[in-house]
Image: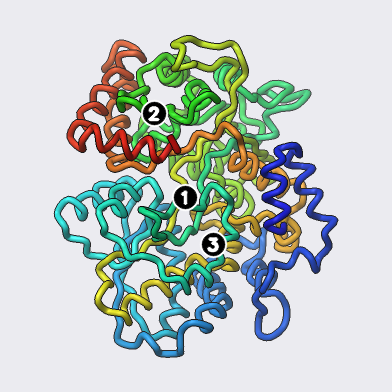
Amino acid sequence: MKTGLYNYIRAAQKMNRRQMLKGTAAMGAAAMMPKGAAMADGHGNVRAEILKIPGVGAGSPTDSDWQKVGEMCLGATKENVAEGEFEGVELTFMGLNNQNLHNFLFRGFLKPWEAYTGAKINWIDLAQADYNARLQQSIATGTVDFDIIEMGAPFEGDVLGKGLASEMPDWVKEQIDMDDYVDYLKAPVGTWDGKTYRVSIDGDCHSFAYRKDYFGPDGIGGAEVPTTWQEINQVSKDLVGKEDPLTGLPAHGYLDPLKGWGGFGFYFLENRAAAYAKHPNSPAWLFDPETMAPMVNNPAWVQAIQDVMDLIEAGAYPADQINADPGTTAFQQFLAGTGSMLMWWGDVGSSARTSDTSVVGDVVGFGINPASDRVYNAQSGAWEDTRNEAPNMAYIGWGVYVMATVEGDEKKKKAAWSAAAHLGGKDLSLWASAYPSGFQPYRNSHFQFEEWEEAGYDRAFIEDYLGSNADSYNHPNAAIEPRIPGIFQYYSAAEDELAKGYAGQYGSAQETADAIAAAWEEITDQIGRDSQIAVYRASLGL
């Protein structure tokens, strides 16, 4: 869809997602082609060609597929870099090996880039649970041993705020077409003190995935798909002892991850808490913006923790859920046919149809973060009996950042930024959104669902999947994550205390929440309360 139309719809907030997406179809094939769309081998649209690799329903992509896509998307690089220009340059890239995605794909995408430019990339592969500790160690000890990093916006306070990154050159901004980003990924995200540092490669909001075969007139989960957390908990309890209609194994409702994930697991409690705690009257829902006092032990957050404890007590989760982290709930449980409801990053949607491990592709549906039938007003200190939606903009997406290690060597600096720009290229990003990559749609141009249909997706599925992302990005009460120093220290501490609470080491949800709040107060004091207040307020636009 054209950027102007998308922004108009976003501002109007008057069209539902089905109307929005159907409206784009009338624009015609010629109008749908992105401005300046690259051509493959002198003929055809490269976007259409790469989406055929390997093709939806043809199994999971392989390294040869990633290399083909990387090769076909080199056009923009060749406009800015001469062949062999970076001969002799070595770069070190730090990123994830999570679910055999992320760095594994980057290797394939960048292999043809290395062959063309002459540069060589060395890799530091990290498990998601190890990521925060490794990055914080590098920052604390001043031993940044990488030139490029895959990093999320929440870490910008730690990295950009300490001057550890290289400012993006103007030619990179043009090559990657930053104007195509959805609005919530534009400045100030990716910037610090007015300077731009980030090449976005992901959007990251959590959306709701559910099994349609569990719901309907004869569905074991009820006639209607739950739309509130209250309904989700009730359905999850009611499913205990029933049989999964697809696998014949025990049926389960909602899949909460009960094991930490290096701080990333806290987002999944946030999904529940956002609906209870993110009141439309304030952007603040994690800390008091005047004092940095944690809000995590107020009645809204306590209710979210209690929800999880209630399902543990009811025996509603799969066996050994206490050891299930978010990677388990998505890839080893939901996509593999265990459980009927899940909150996760949006790329579960593309994986449902294009991953060898998925058995639910024909029965999965999507929506935004479930609502609550009441919301806590932190300003008045009281619950309000009104429905509240608050999609969780969890992590604000992965990006590629170039470190200040390249400063002083112009050849190395240009090479690092060229590699980053290749990974964040407009056409390559479409392929990564449509196939298993670890990333979800994040550009206005990703919402042209005719392109997805040509790749093999059916219209109803794509309208549902892309719509859940668009509805979350554009929601007026979206729960936005603050880019403050130490954010993952807070999250990791919260995971530690939640694990104790879920294991019964605390006497109640309130005690668990109070323990988290106490840990957060210590972190704030260590970092500096006054400076945290200033950065937090700025991140909220206050």
Q: Is residue 180 left or right of residue 173?
A: right
Indicate left or right for 56 with 21 as reference: left
Q: Identify the disc placed on residue 397.
A: 1
In this view, the residue in front, 212 or 248, is: 212
In the drawing, does residue 394 fall left or right of residue 462? left
- Quarter holding the C terminus is top left
> Residue visible at 63% across and 43% down?
360
In this rendering, the answer to whether 335 lies above or below 429 is above
**How many other residues sit within 10 Å of disc 3, few (<14), some (14-19) or many (≥20)?**
some
**Residue 115, image x, y percentages:** 43, 84
**Rendering quarter of residue 122:** bottom left
Q: Secondary structure at mark 3?
A: helix
Task: Give the number of the disc on residue 296.
Answer: none
Residue beneath the point at 35% across and 49% down: 128
Mark 3 in CB contact with mark 1 (< 8 angstroms): no
The answer for how far apart the CA atoms under marks 3 and 1 are is 15 Å
Quadrant of res 58: bottom right
First in sequence, mark 2 or 3: give its number: 3
Question: Counting residues from the N terminus, which is met first, the one under dot 3 or under dot 1?
Answer: 3
| Residue that carries the numbered disc 2 in the rendered image | 286
Residue at 35% across / 18% down in the picture?
Answer: 297
Q: CA distance from mark 2 to mark 1?
A: 19 Å
Residue kind at label 2, given as amino acid type = Leu
Q: Position of residue 304 (x, y in %)?
A: 45, 20
**Is residue 12 visible from the viewing direction of this image?**
yes
- Marks 2 and 1, the one that precedes in the sequence: 2
- Which residue position is annotated with label 3? 178
Contact between labelled residues 1 and 2, with CB atoms less than 8 Å apart: no
Q: Position of residue 322 (x, y in %)?
A: 37, 29
